[in-house]
Amino acid sequence: MEPRAYGPYPYEPIVDRPPLVWPGGARIAFWAIPNIEVFALDERMPDGPGLIPDVSAWGRRDYGNRVGVFRMMEVMERHGVRGTVALNSEVCDAAPRIVEECLRLGWELMGHCESNTRRLNEAGSEAAAGRIVARTLERIERATGRRPTGWLGAGRQETWGTLDRLVAEGCRYVVDWDSDDQPVLMEVAGGTIVSMPYGAGVSDKQAFEGSGFSADDFERMIRRAFDVLYAESAVSGRVASVSLHPYIIGVPHRIGALDRALAHIGSHDGVWLATGEEIVAHFLEWKAGQGAG
């Protein structure tokens, strides 16, 4: 994508689009995006004071990979919610047991850079950023036998060339943009890629670290966002999502909020519990049908 003032898709207000239809007459597609990450103790922690080592910040995040992620998995499995994991590829080496459990649960794995201490727009050049994308996808493919089709950049950051590189590497969708409540088809030099909703701020990181929410506040955030989207989906299908981090939501005093919120979502009719790849596949099929019509 060449530098530009607006994104790689036309402005299309949601009120002017044809009604989006989900499989089986579902009203709303719900997906959960656990960010399973690894942080290098000998590198600067993102958004931190720049201390090396930052033992306190690193230890909290390591808790997520040692304990919190398995607590989160248990809750999600109980409610029939499969994760679409934004996976730092170095997790495959640092914590392979997590990857093993993701595969057992039938979770989808997206690319999420190699480590969360290294972001694409800090790589120094387009070529270096492109190599990070390639290495990330290749490492996950070696660990799982399946190449990721989705991508979420570390820190949700990209370079001007990231979308083109993702298309060239076989990705079908990206989650960095979060500019809509429905999937959006983006046109780039290398072809097309789908921008997927990331919850419009329904994130444990934004809630707890950004806004100082309590666990009850976060539960209400998930429920209220879902309720609005569910009501709007009577006219046209919507995507509801939640972004999760094991070191944040997976601690004992917060996990109940996720449990109760997922129970609320599951109590509604017409909810499609899907993965990102499933949503994108159906959206592209539906979009092709619209064009044919």
Image (cartoon, rainbow, N blue to C red):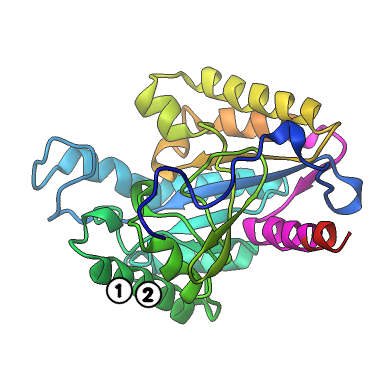
Please provide percent x and percent y for residue 240: 67, 38
- Range covered by the magenta-colored residues: 265-287
Q: Circle 2: is it few (<14), some (14-19), or many (20+) Cα within 10 Å?
A: some
Distance, label 2 to label 1, CA atoms, is 5 Å
Position of 28 with respect to 32 (left or right) is: right
Q: Quick check: can you spot residue 39? A: no
Q: Are marks 2 and 1 in contact (CB under 8 Å)?
A: yes
The outermost residue toward the left is: 52
Q: Residue at x 59, y 40 (%)?
A: 11
Q: Which residue is mark 1?
A: 131
Q: Is residue 205 magenta?
A: no
Residue 125: x percent and y percent? 21, 65
Quadrant of the rendering where the N terminus is positioned: bottom left
Q: Is residue 121 above or below residue 226?
A: below
Quick check: 125 left or right of 209?
A: left
Circle 1 packing at 10 Å, graded few (<14), some (14-19), many (20+), is some
Q: Quadrant of residue 19?
A: top right
Q: Could you say whether the residue bearing mark 2 is in a helix, strand or loop?
A: helix
Judge whether 53 appears above or below 134 on screen: above
Residue 26's spot in the image, x, y percent? Answer: 86, 44
Q: Which residue is mark 2?
A: 134
Please, what is the three-letter code of the amino acid marked with disc 1? Arg
